[in-house]
Amino acid sequence: MPSIKDFKHLQIPLHDISLATDGFANKNLIANGGFGKVYTGLSEKYGCIAIKRWDREHGQGDHEFKTEISLLSKYKHENIVSLLGFCDEDGEKILVYKYESNASLDKHLNNKDLTWIQRLQICLDVARGLKYLHYDVGRHKRILHRDVKSSNILLDENWKPKISDFGLARVGPANMKSTFVISNVCGTRGYIDPDYLTNGYLTQKSDVYSFGVVLWEVLCGRHAHVIYNNERVVLSILVQRHYISGTLHSIIPSHLQNQINIDSLHTFTEIAYQCLKNVEERPTMQQVVEQLQKALHHQLAVKKKKEEAKPTYGDEKTKDRSPSPPPQEIVLSTYMHCEGCAREVRRCLKGFEGVEAVFTDCETHKVVVKGEKADPLKVLKRVQKKCNRKVELLSPVPKPPLREEPKKPEQEEPPKQEEKKHEVVITSVLSYLSSLLPMFSKLDHTRKRIHYLSS
C-alpha cells in the first residue's frame, strides 16, 4: 500500500479543519461511524464539508485510514463519495469529504416523499458505482467494498447516491474466482454474505449479496433488522419467505404499492431475490444494472402514458393537438457559499405560490425553480425578502412594459356643404313666411268688412 507521503497534495492543516468545525463543536456533530465521529463544517476553500475524525478508543485503525485515502484519491466515479483531503497531524487522523446534504439512504427508507421512480434511480446509480469498482478500475484488478449497506450510501441535494466508507475495501486480481480468503470476516450483520461468513471466501458476489439486502430495504421501507409480528427478524430471510409464498404485498408499504407498475415490480423483485441466492447463482453487477434499467424503463413508460392521457385544453375531439408547453423554469442567481445557504433558499420557496420543485447549485450560485404557475417576479422578491439576499433573475428575462402611444384626439368632421345650404334655404323660407303674416291678417280683415257691407 502507498505511503501517506505519496498523498501530500491532499493534506489539510489541522488548524483549518478545527476552524471549519468550531473546534469540533458538538453542534456540528452529525453521526458516529466505525471510524469515529463525523462532523460538518464550513471551509473557505472547500465550502460545506463532512469530517470523519478517528476515535482512538473505538474506531478502526491506521490500515483503514490509509486504505480510504489510497482508493478515493485514485478512483473517481459520480456515484462514489468525493475525498477532498486528510489530516495526519498531532495524533489526529481525519478524512475530509464533500458534504452531501440529504444524509444517508437509511434515513429515508420510510420517507413517503421519496417516490418509487426516485428509489429506482438511486438503486440503479449505486449499482453503477459497484459495477465500476468490480470491473472498471483497471484491466487486471477489482475493488471489493465489503461493507455495502444503506447507511454507507450518501445522498446529495438532488438525491444522487454516493457510495462511502472504503476503510474495509480490498483491491485484488480480477482473474481469480475467489479474490481473497479472509480469516477475520468484516462487515455488518444483516448485510454480510452467508457464504463469506461461513467459509471466508470473499468475491465480488459478496458485495452483490449486500446490495441485494439494500434493494429489499428500499422496496420494503425497512432496515436490515426489523420487528415483524412482534419478533426481531433479519430482512433478507423475511423477504425470501414472502417472495416464495407470493405474499410480498404484505411487507411493501401501501404508499409505494399505489405507485409501482406490476412489470417494474416483477423485474425489480426478481433481480433482488437472485442477489440473495447461493454465490454460484447470484448475478454480476453488470446484470443487476441491466435489470434495474429495465425496471426503471417499465415505470417511466407508465408515467408517460398517464401524462399523455391527461385532458388538454380546447376541443377534445381534435386529433392534431399541439404539444403542451414544458413546465416553466425560473433561473435565479444569488451567492451561496455553502449548503446551509442553499438549504435556506430551498426552504423559503418550499410550498410557495406555484412552486413545484427547487434545485440549488452552490458552485454556480444558481437556483432553478420549476412550476407552471410560479410568477418569476414573486419568486425573486420572496428570496430577497426571506433570505435577505441580492438576487438576479436570469430566466425568463423580464420584458420591459409596453409603451402605449397617446391617442390622437378625434377630429370632428366638418359639416357637409350641402347640409349648410339646406339650413340657409329653410331659414330664408321661414323668414319670408313670417314677413307675409301681417299681409294675410289685413286681407282677412278686408274680407270680413266686404261681407258685412254686402249684407
Image (cartoon, rainbow, N blue to C red):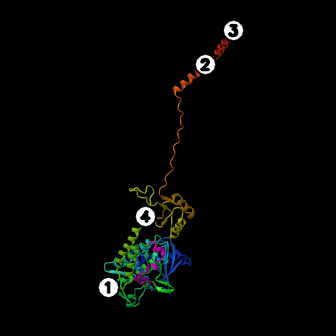
Q: Position of residue 299 (x, y in %)?
A: 40, 70
- Marks 1 & 2, CB-CB < 8 Å contact: no
Q: Closer to the camera: disc 4 or disc 2?
A: 2
Q: Rounded to the nearest whole Å, what is the CA distance between mark 3 and mark 4?
A: 114 Å
Q: Position of residue 336 (x, y in %)?
A: 51, 66
Q: Residue tagged by mark 4? A: 307
Check the image and report above or below for 445 versus 293. Answer: above
Other residues around mark 1 within 10 Å, as few (<14) / some (14–19) / many (≥20): few
Where is residue 315, by image quadrant? Answer: bottom left
Q: Closer to the camera: disc 3 or disc 2?
A: 3
Between discs 1 and 4, the one toward the N terminus: 1
- Marks 3 & 2, CB-CB < 8 Å contact: no
Between discs 1 and 2, the one toward the N terminus: 1
Q: Residue tagged by mark 2? A: 433
Q: Residue tagged by mark 1? A: 177
Q: Amino acid at mark 3?
A: Leu
Q: Is residue 313 magenta?
A: no
Residue range highlighted in magenta: 238-259
Between discs 3 and 1, the one toward the N terminus: 1
Q: Amino acid at mark 4?
A: Glu
Q: Rounded to the nearest whole Å, what is the CA distance between mark 1 and mark 2?
A: 134 Å
Quarter of the N terminus within the rendering: bottom left
In terms of secondary structure, where does tag 4 sit? helix
Q: Name the residue: 53% across, 41% down.
A: 407
Between discs 4 and 2, the one toward the N terminus: 4
Q: Give the number of the disc on residue 383.
A: none
Q: Residue tagged by mark 3? A: 453
In terms of secondary structure, where does tag 2 sit? helix
Q: Rounded to the nearest whole Å, what is the CA distance between mark 1 and mark 4?
A: 48 Å
Q: Rounded to the nearest whole Å, what is the CA distance between mark 3 and mark 2?
A: 31 Å
